[in-house]
Amino acid sequence: MGEIRPHSVTITEFGAVGDGVTLNTKAFQNAIFYLNSFADKGGAKLFVPAGRWLTGSFDLISHLTLWLDKDAIILGSMNSDDWPVVDPLPSYGRGRELPGGRHRSLIYGRNLTDVIITGDNGTIDGQGSVWWNWFRSKTLNYTRPHLVELMNSTGVVISNLTFLNSPFWTIHPVYCSHVIVQDVTILAPLDSPNTDGIDPDSSDDVCIEDCYISTGDDLISIKSGWDEYGISFARPSRNIIIRRLTGHNQNGSGIAIGSEMSGGVSEVYAENIYFFNSSTGIILKTARGRGGYVRNIYISNVTLVGVDTAIFFNSNFSQHPDEFYDPNSLPVIERITFKDVIGDNIKVAGLLKGIEGDSFRHICLLNITLDVTTKSPWNCSNIQGYSSLVSPEICEPLKESIYPKHYSDCYLLPNHLRSSGNQNKGSWLFSS
């Protein structure tokens, strides 16, 4: 990951001025165009020194390291014309917020391989408040841009940086493989709309570790396309590892799956998680019409403090891309394990609501201890599963004991009891 690029240039060599006022889009574009000639010679590094570097959207290339020095701040332009409009994602069929296209992210790349965005804890600030205001006043013509989006790319590393004030979701790897996000801080005001932290979308082999996230929406949300478009695009999110994540918010959750999960989500492993002063700990979001599946999810070693709802299955996400979705297309939800969760000052332990006539099954809760401040800690419907060592007492549909008969119905529990090995789940990380 830390290989030295044989070629390096500084953004100032291309006329950039770090005064926070001069628009440097052309300088970034020209520098990256120049570095393209080194892509087949071991790649290149674009160095951004201390300063405030205002820019519009720019494109990355393969075999590139974008490096931000300690006091380097890349600032997103507050003029929407500097964020060009591009086609909607095929797995969404339209912009997520509005029909038609969407504004391109500030830092954008597609069809790339071996891209590193890193530095000595520099900052990328989307200056998103103008976009939040346009969104609230309904004056936008297109869906808001992300801060960083990499599309159809492989071998992506994003590390050692602070991301601030994204207009929309902050880091969005979509149709990507082998993505590592580590040691990043992501901040946005707690009331900023839809400023998710990291949203792996129809992507596989993603590792998110050692991050601190505090934003206006889900800290991490795993997605895979929207209704009929996600079903036909059929690219799942799978093999996703989240570990040592800390954060909080007021309007979203710590870790979400969905609600756009129509391409399927599977093999998600989250461990060593700490959420505080938040509305929801872990949420599964889906709806009639989504189709797809969420299966083989293992979440363990979670600490929650001051969280309204610890575990939430919400099947009522009624936003659809258009009228052509199939309301009879039901999601398959199965083999989701929660293990070793402790919570202090929790209002509701679990709000676990499936869909009538659908299958939400093999939901397993093991060793869950929550200090709950309301009278009815669990509320469950249209769900099936097992539990052991859960306090306060679990709802009826999950009361049947995991042991001795049902541990093999619970994702990863049989192996977990026999060995402390990681079932090879992280081996791809170390093979590259």
Image: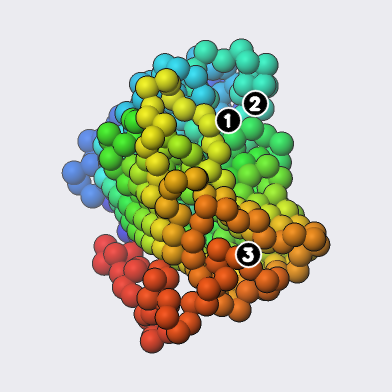
Which residue bears the numbered disc 2? 132
Residue sticking out furthest to the bottom: 418
Callout 3 secondary element? loop
Q: Is residue 204 visible?
A: yes
Which residue bears the numbered disc 3? 395
Residue nearest the observer in this picture, 289 or 216: 289
Residue type at the position of mark 3: Cys
Q: Residues within 10 Å of mark 3 (few under 14, many from 20)?
A: some
Callout 2 secondary element? helix
Q: Is residue 337 left or right of residue 431?
A: right
Q: Which mark is residue 67?
A: none
Residue sticking out furthest to the left: 40
Q: Picture quarter containing residue 39?
A: top left
Q: Position of residue 333 (x, y in %)?
A: 42, 53
Q: Position of residue 79 (x, y in %)?
A: 57, 17
- Residue 129's place in the image compared with 4, above or below, is above
The answer to whether mark 2 and mark 1 are in CB contact below 8 A is yes
CA gap between label 3 and label 2 equals 40 Å
Q: Picture quarter containing residue 212?
A: bottom right
Q: Residue at x 71, y 45 (%)?
A: 250
CA gap between label 1 and label 3 equals 40 Å
